[in-house]
Image (spheres, grey):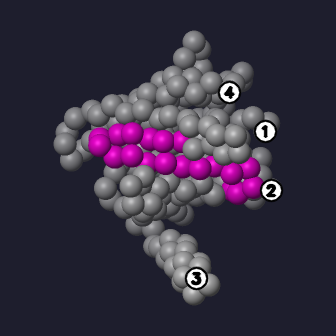
Amino acid sequence: MELKKFLLILLFIITIKCIESKKSLRTFVVSQDKPPKPKPLTDFTAYDSREKNRWYLIRTTSTDLDTIVIIDYRAKKIIANVEGEWVNNIFNVTFSIYDDTLDKWIDGVMLRKSKVFSTKYEIQWNNERLYIKPSAFRKTMKIYKETSNELYAQFRYRSIWRTWSKYKYDLQIYTTKLPDALYLMIMTVMHHTTQLHNV
């Protein structure tokens, strides 16, 4: 029995180490744009890892509904639309993302599933189910495939003292299975849901 427990713990540690050592295929630095005042939600620009070239613009509005529009800066076209409510303890998110490979828009939803001591967010898009479990004690949020626990992406919030009072994230993507816009959408919604409560 003790041997079985030891082997299970060892397997768990090896799995965690494999995840931690996984190499990212694409890395973006996602930086807050200077918002026009007053504006409750945060706009972002996604740059390459050296912060030299713009890749994506993330624009937000907040009226009766919260909205996000993600623009491919190089192609000068909209690649994602998001709407719903995800601040002030309300969570109801629907979105549509353009899939380049299929040449069409595909709708999806993001759900919040709360338990007594934990909260899990589930993302459903194009027959894929992803999940993310935020923690108040961690600056890194990881996005996993629901069925296999495969790490698809993660974003890490940089400390304010490193970013000159601007919100900034390092987004690492580990797969080519899904478009970048999906991870940018998740990161933006999670930022509005978590970080904006702390300001």
Residue under label 4: 89
Secondary element type, mark 2: helix
Q: Amino acid at mark 4?
A: Asn
* Camera-side residue of 99 and 114: 114
> Which stretch is magenta?
121-139
The numbered dot on residue 1 is: 3
Dot placed on the residue nearer the N-terminal end, 3 or 2: 3
Percent across and percent down for residue 3 are 57, 87
Residue at 69%, 51% (x, y): give it. Answer: 135
User: Could you tell me the amino acid type at mark 2?
Assistant: Trp
Say left or right for 45 vs 125.
right
Give x and y (percent) for residue 81: 41, 29
Residue on which disc 1 sits = 198
**Quadrant (top left, top right, bottom left, bottom right) of the N terminus:** bottom right
The residue carrying mark 2 is 161
Label 4 residue SS? loop
- Residue 195, horizontal then vertical, whole percent: 71, 41
Secondary element under disc 3, as helix, strand or loop, is: loop
Q: Earlier in the sequence, mark 4 or mark 2?
A: 4
